Image (cartoon, rainbow, N blue to C red):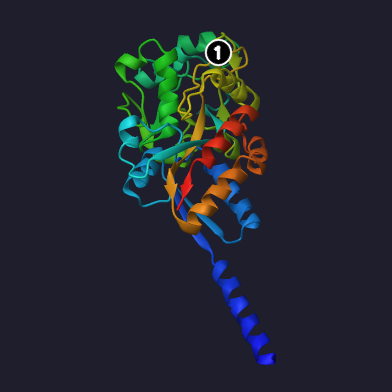
């Protein structure tokens, strides 16, 4: 009897240990949401110690490429995938909006801590038409600021980037000449400036270069104590980026949200809407396999619940409650074989 009990306990322990083996889930993509994804994956490990989610912050373009090549379990992008990209994913793809963020215009101008810009001045800077901080067009928006007569160095993303997609989408809508001269997308041909890789790279370039200006996600600016500009929105109001003003930008999109969640919220209506805002997405195959698939789906459910409360402290906006319910329904459509 003793031997039987021992054998049963041993078998139970073996079965338990076998079922409790760590599962590694690999993802890659956008640098824009990296601060909150790092937090989420770390916190979720406390909920499920056997769910090891590894994430490479390589840019939206890289994340989409790896998803298509099937070298990751999920991708991530701030720019929704285009139809031709989706067609290349054998298992199909579900866009899961996770949080809402802001692309800020950060700058390093000694002595200037309060700067206002509009689409025309930003466009002029990145087209190479506005070359100095003392330019009359910038001065007109900032009559009380002492703008130095120093050269402007625009910094842009050198890699395929959803942050670039949001920024150039905004300029294509709000600028007078941007769409015709440069266009929008994850990668464009920049007329002037220097390129840096990732939000991390652009942040570093701005921080180390007096006279520079660049576009990055708000969390990167705050973590590195970079000054950011108030941007004139569609209603004519200069608005600073925050979880509140980003939420205001998203509010109007809910009325016409497509079933696949692929939507732009740049240059949105609303007095308090921050104009360079966007959803960021996890790109998940429609069909997942085994324990890895079960754990990824479980994580997505958690991200739509407790995970949302972590957004605002990291300078993102949580998804609106009505959208969360739609996303939860979409997650349930993911098949696990």
> Which residue sits furthest right?
2
Residue beneath the point at 56% across and 8% down: 236
Percent coordinates x, y for residue 27 in the rendering: 45, 49
Horizontal side of residue 66 vs 147, given as left or right: left
Q: How many marks?
A: 1
Horizontal side of residue 183 vs 5, given as left or right: left
Q: Is residue 197 above or below residue 103?
A: below
Q: Is residue 266 visible?
A: yes
Indicate the quadrant where residue 151 lies.
top left
Residue beneath the point at 57% across and 39% down: 224
Indicate the quadrant where residue 64 lies.
top left
Q: Looking at this view, is 91 or 117 the one in front?
A: 91
Q: Which residue is mark 1?
A: 269
Q: Looking at this view, is 134 or 129 the one in front?
A: 129
Percent coordinates x, y for residue 240 in the rendering: 60, 22
Residue beneath the point at 40% across and 31% down: 156
Q: Looking at this view, is 89 or 232 the one in front?
A: 89
Percent coordinates x, y for residue 120 in the rendering: 44, 12
Q: Is residue 277 above or below residue 267?
A: below
Say which element carries label 1.
loop
Percent coordinates x, y for residue 7 in the rendering: 62, 85
């Amino acid at each position: 009897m003793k031997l039987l009990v021992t054998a049963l306990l041993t078998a139970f322990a073996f079965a338990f240990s076998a079922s409790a083996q760590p599962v590694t889930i690999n993802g890659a993509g956008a640098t824009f949401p990296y601060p909150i994804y790092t937090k989420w994956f770390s916190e979720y490990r406390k909920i499920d110690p056997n769910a090891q989610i590894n994430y490479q912050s390589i840019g939206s373009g890289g994340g989409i490429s790896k998803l298509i090549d099937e070298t990751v379990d999920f991708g991530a992008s701030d720019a929704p995938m285009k139809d031709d990209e989706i067609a290349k994913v054998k298992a199909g793809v579900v866009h899961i909006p996770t949080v809402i963020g802001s692309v800020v215009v950060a700058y390093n101008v000694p002595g200037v801590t309060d700067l206002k810009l509009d689409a025309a001045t930003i466009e002029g800077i990145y087209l190479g038409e506005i070359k100095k901080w003392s330019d009359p067009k910038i001065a007109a928006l900032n009559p009380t600021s002492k703008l130095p007569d120093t050269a402007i160095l625009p910094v842009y993303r050198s890699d395929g980037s959803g942050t670039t997609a949001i920024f150039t989408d905004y300029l294509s809508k709000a600028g007078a000449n941007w769409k015709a001269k440069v266009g929008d997308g994850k990668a464009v041909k920049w007329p002037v400036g220097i390129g840096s890789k990732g939000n991390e790279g652009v942040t570093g370039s701005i921080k180390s270069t007096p006279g520079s200006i660049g576009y990055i996600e708000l969390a990167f600016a705050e973590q590195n104590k970079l000054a950011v500009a108030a941007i004139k929105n569609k209603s004519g109001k200069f608005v600073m980026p925050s979880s509140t003003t980003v939420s205001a930008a998203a509010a109007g999109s809910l009325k016409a949200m497509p079933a696949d969640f692929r939507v732009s919220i740049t240059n949105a209506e609303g007095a308090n809407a921050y104009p360079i805002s966007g959803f960021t997405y996890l790109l998940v195959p429609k069909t997942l396999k085994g324990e890895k698939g079960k754990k990824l789906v479980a994580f997505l459910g958690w991200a739509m619940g407790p995970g949302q409360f972590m957004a605002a402290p990291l300078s993102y906006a949580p998804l609106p409650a009505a959208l969360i319910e739609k996303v939860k329904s979409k997650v349930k459509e993911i098949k696990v074989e």
